[in-house]
Image (cartoon, rainbow, N blue to C red):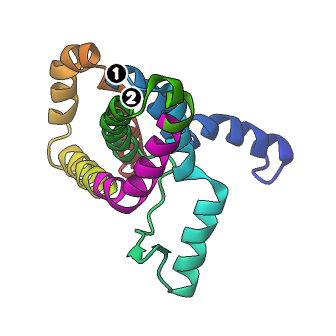
Amino acid sequence: MDTSSQTYIIMKLMGDAAFYFLPIILAVSAAKKFRCNEYLAAAVGGILIHPNFINLINTAKETGEGLYFAWLPVNLASYASSVLPIILIVWFMSYIERGVEKMVSKSLRMIFVPLFTLVITGPAGILFIGPMGNIAGGYLAAFMGWLNLAAPWLGPMLVGTFTPLMVMCGMHNGLIPFWGQHACLYRV
């Protein structure tokens, strides 16, 4: 099939959609585990892959200028297909949401809990938690790649050994992008 044909492009888009929107999908799953609002989690995941945010990052990279939220620098990272940043952000969000719920009266929770949760979580996620998760994810991916090269038998053995525990904790899906990414990079 011609890779420039519209059919190929649409088929590729269908295959990539879940990975592109992975932060939103993982945000909803993480919200279930952390017992917080799934819609707020999806909104936070959407912030990371919003086209305007991506354009800001790409423009800052192209021009060599920094990107700032207020006076604080924003890390010029791409969060599409990322795993750890959104899980860490939703974990943080779960604490913020519970804290805000305790401070706001029941009659005002419907409006102010989502507002304050997003106003606090969004900037914290973009400025601090997301970049930390991105760095940690990069180290984890590099370690998995090294492990795959140094001892190709060890990685699958460890995953096979710990998969039952990871499934019980809901962590098993977090390794799929790392293994898939490095399997493609190191395939001969």
- Of the pair 92 and 77, the residue shown nearer to us: 92
Residue with the most extreme bottom position: 64
Q: Residues within 10 Å of mark 1 (few under 14, many from 20)?
A: some
Residue sitting at x 69%, y 35%: 14
Q: Are marks 1 and 2 in contact (CB under 8 Å)?
A: yes
Label drawn at residue 72: none
x and y percentages locating residue 132 in the rendered image: 28, 56
- Of the pair 144 and 90, the residue shown nearer to us: 90
Residue sitting at x 46%, y 23%: 106
Residue with the most extreme right position: 6
Mark 2, secondary structure of its residue: helix
Q: Quadrant of residue 131?
A: bottom left
- Of the pair 10 and 35, the residue shown nearer to us: 35
Three-letter code, disc 2: Ala
Residue topped by disc 1: 33
Q: Which is the main secondary structure of the residues drawn in magenta?
A: helix
x and y percentages locating residue 27 in the rendered image: 46, 34
Q: Report the Cα–Cα distance between label 1 and label 2.
A: 5 Å
Q: Is residue 122 magenta?
A: yes
Residue sitting at x 51%, y 51%: 48
The quarter in which the N terminus is drawn is top right
Mark 1, secondary structure of its residue: helix
The magenta region covers 113-133
Label drawn at residue 30: 2
Three-letter code, disc 1: Lys
Q: Is residue 142 above or below residue 92?
A: below
Q: Quadrant of residue 21?
A: top right
Judge left or right: residue 135 versus residue 153.
right
Q: Is residue 52 above or below residue 182?
A: below
**Across the whole image, how many numbered discs are drawn on residues?**
2
Q: Is residue 184 above or below residue 24?
A: below
